Amino acid sequence: VQLVIGPFIDIWSRKKIMVFSQLSRGLVFLVPIFMLLFDEIHVWNLFVVQFVLGIIQPLYVPASLAISPTLFKKNELTNVNAYIDGTVRLMSILAPTLGGIISVVIGVTNTLYIVCLCFLLSATSLLWVHVKSSENIQVRLAWFKELKGGISYFLNQKHLVWLGFFAAFIQFAVGVTMVLNVPFVTDDLAGSSFELGLFLSGFPAGYLVGSFFVPRIKISENRRRFMLGAIAIGGLSFVLLSFVYEIWQAVVLEIIAGMSTPFFNVHSTSIYQRSVPNEMLGKVFSVRLLIIRSVMPLGVYFGGHFSEGYSVRLSYLSIGCLVFIAAVIGILLPYFKFLEEDTVNTTLDEKFG
């Protein structure tokens, strides 16, 4: 869906796509609600919910990223992305705890009603967002030509390609940690469920703090070093995890990794939004997200098989070295100086008519 939907995000109203996405996600939760009411809940009901959410997510995310440049000035995008990213991370910390408390107090069915209501409120609030008239892109080419043009544009802008490449390293590492984190804390560190929760909340908590500092630290003159340095710190945190034997040390490393990551993610997103023409944003963000979504399962596969064949600690060490070396190469090689710039190499009209 991520690859196929790109041209439509640039053809349709991005605001309407976001409203439709939130309404659809809210309505799909009626499936488990009705099944619970009739005491006929089954595992397949939850698979239906997850399947629909998986289809809708590739609609909402690139549309939300592509609509921001139509709402804010270019010099405001870094701040905006930092606040949005920080809010998402804050909710990732609060939501599981609040969801658990609410479901115990009022029951699972009523909690699902609240989920539906939240999506409805989100869709309603989006109706109040005022977008410029230029946000609605007119149909110019057939779907395949639009898709081909988006991919070609992405591949011809080396700063976009390499930013996607470094983002892929991050997502690969995330995929690895999805497999390693639980056995690392529960087996290697002999941690309790509470300590596992502390460890898993360390990264989003650090990310929230980092998002607060991103718009307050000016890095225009050393943007490449800051962005790739953030990836290097993340890689180094993996390396150090392979040597720790106390849960508090592991939590601190996760917080540090979380604090550094938004310095790459936020600025990378802002560069895309500032340098890509509005009529190409949906397709380009879809290509970028496709790369990210495709690499994560590879990380899951690597983490699962490598840790079974060797050890969890050696897996952390290997992926950490890989990420760290890639980031350091990007910092040291003069070739990557183009990451300091937002400008594109050719205009859209010159390249794609």
Image: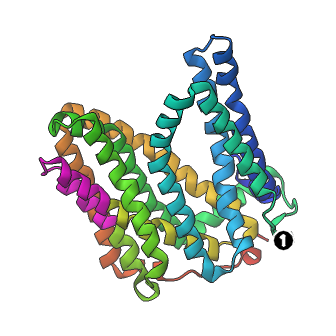
SS for callout 1: helix
Residue drawn at (36%, 49%) of the image: 201
**Amino acid carrying mark 1 in the image:** Ser
Report the side of 342 relative to 340 (left or right): right
Would you say residue 116 is visible in this rendering?
yes
In the rendered image, residue 34, in percent from the top left (x then y), is placed at 70, 19
Would you say residue 344 is visible in this rendering?
no
Quarter assignment of residue 21: top right
Residue drawn at (87%, 70%) of the image: 133
**Residue at the front extreme of this rendering:** 105
Pick whichever, 22 or 307, lies toward us. 22
Q: Is residue 217 above or below residue 253?
A: below
Q: Which residue is mark 1?
A: 134
Residue drawn at (42%, 52%) of the image: 171
Report the side of 239 relative to 104 (left or right): left
Q: Is residue 351 magenta?
A: no
Specify the principal SS of the magenta part. Answer: helix
Quarter assignment of residue 30: top right
Q: Is residue 235 magenta?
A: yes
In the rendered image, residue 165, in percent from the top left (x then y), is placed at 45, 61
**Residue at the bottom extreme of this rendering:** 221
In the rendered image, residue 251, in percent from the top left (x then y), is placed at 25, 53
Circle 1 residues within 10 Å: few <14, some 14–19, many ≥20: few
Report the side of 271 relative to 245 (left or right): right
In which quadrant is the C terminus drawn?
bottom right
In which quadrant is the N terminus drawn?
top right
Q: Tell me how the rendering is colored.
A: rainbow
In the rendered image, residue 47, in percent from the top left (x then y), is placed at 58, 24
Residue drawn at (61%, 38%) of the image: 54
Q: Is residue 279 above or below residue 309?
A: below
Q: Which residues are magenta?
A: 231-256
Query: Tag count in the figure?
Result: 1
